Image (cartoon, rainbow, N blue to C red):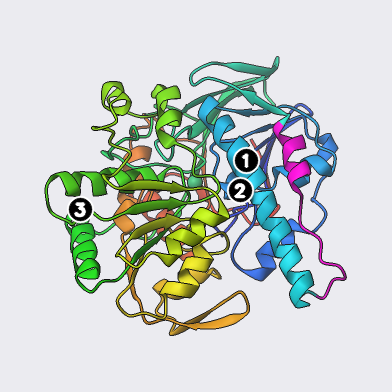
Amino acid sequence: MATIQFLGATRTVTGSKHLVEVDGYRTMVDCGLFQGLKELRLRNWEPFPLDPASINSVILTHAHIDHTGYLPKFVRDGFNGPVYATPATVELARILLPDSARLQEEDAAYANKSGSSKHEPALPLYTERDANEALRLLDSVNFNKKVQLTNKLSFDFVTAGHIIGSSFVIFDFESLEGRRKRMIMTGDLGRYDEPIIPDPSDVDEADYIVVESTYGDRDHPQYDVKAKLAEIINETARLGGHILIPAFAIGRTQQLLYLIRELEEENRIPILPVFVDSPMAVSATKLYLRHKEDHDLEMTDLMDERRNPLATKRFNLARTIQESKGVSAEEESTIVISASGMATGGRILHHLRKRLPDERNTVIFAGFQAVGTRGRRLVDGAPEVKIFGEIVPVRARIERLENLSAHADSHEILRWLGGFNRAPEKVFLVHGEPGAQEALKDKIVEKFGWSVEIPEYLQKFEL
Ligand SMILES: [Zn+2]
């Protein structure tokens, strides 16, 4: 007996958790945090729909918090099996989960201090200690290496082209009638022909496909992203303003640094100080040197400080609070990249509070902005936003560079699906807002004639 049950990222883009059960063995693909709308965030606090102790293993597709950030709570509530992930995902999770815990703890401390919580005292969803407990369970698995979970169920990872370490999970299992079946789950599907990150892997056959649909209803605009970035940087610098880019310290940040570096070398922009402001601001260069399977940069360039494509000419990492305060006190025009990418928390909030009221500044959103987040309100043109309980007027210029998104657009999702050489029994669409999912479903049916499901929260299907 084989089933799949959808415990998150159903008709929404966060909280990815998909439970696969084959003959009583339970493995969950991703263990993500819900973000955005309050009714979703409340799910993080509710008891998990099944006993976590009854789940045998977890498999992570990549390190983003909407795919891993629930793990510390899950472990505290009783899960105690192995957590499989690629080597770079393991390394990123070691940076990211304790940081997520610190944010939870800071939020709770702030709620207690300001009396803004109905709970006395407000508690964090999980603590740094919980995160460290969860990290003990991580088990690193290389790409293309088969892991036999039971005699009827195995999986392997292939590259997803989304961020460093990102993978698809390919399951091989025995169905009810004793037939061999294959199911592929994309996690987040990356893009084609991007600098640094390889293309998503081609997969030629599967009986079931679980695919993300963040941009299922649209294509990334076809403009020259470098030219647009140059225009924004030049215009903002001319006014003496600052450029803020909300983004997680690893992934999009390196794509941006790569482009800024190229623009500097082509003399198309002034050489400005560039700061990556994050307690997680590890040297990405070291990470990329250790995981050459995850990118297509020249190792010789990475090792040469003058040619390093992941650093700009006046490049700085701000790790401590003190350094971060120095960044926001800069008078000269700066480019600051800081988390979180949807402006839901993290140091970017301090920068936004300071820089949003000044019309000389520009905020650039490079990733998807989920419903209910501050980032979404800003790209939708809100005249003011609330930050740390304070109303902050928005006078800065707000820009989107959707071409820098790490997610495949509708055209790219269809291109990837077009690589399968036979029709699957079923395609499940996850990780998308309802409009995007309906649009993608129509396109898949029209183009391939396949059977497509958009699962509801907790819905279960027999495989
Ligand atoms: Zn992701």
Amino acid type, label 1: Asp
Q: Nearer the viewer, residue 127 or 317?
A: 317
Q: Is residue 174 above or below residue 460?
A: above
Image quadrant in which the N terminus is located: top right
Left of 361 or right of it: where is 351? right
Q: Secondary structure at mark 3?
A: helix
Magenta span includes 134: yes
The residue where tag 3 is placed is 226
Label 3 or label 2, whichever comes before in sequence order: 2
For ligand 1, tell me if the residue under mark 1 lies within 8 Å: no
Classify residue 112 by image quadrant: bottom right
Marks 2 and 1 close (CB-CB < 8 Å): yes
Q: Which residue is drawn at the image coordinates 63% and 47% (left, top)? A: 99
Q: Is residue 179 above or below residue 109?
A: above
Magenta span includes 280: no
User: Residue 328 placed where, x, y %?
Assistant: 44, 64
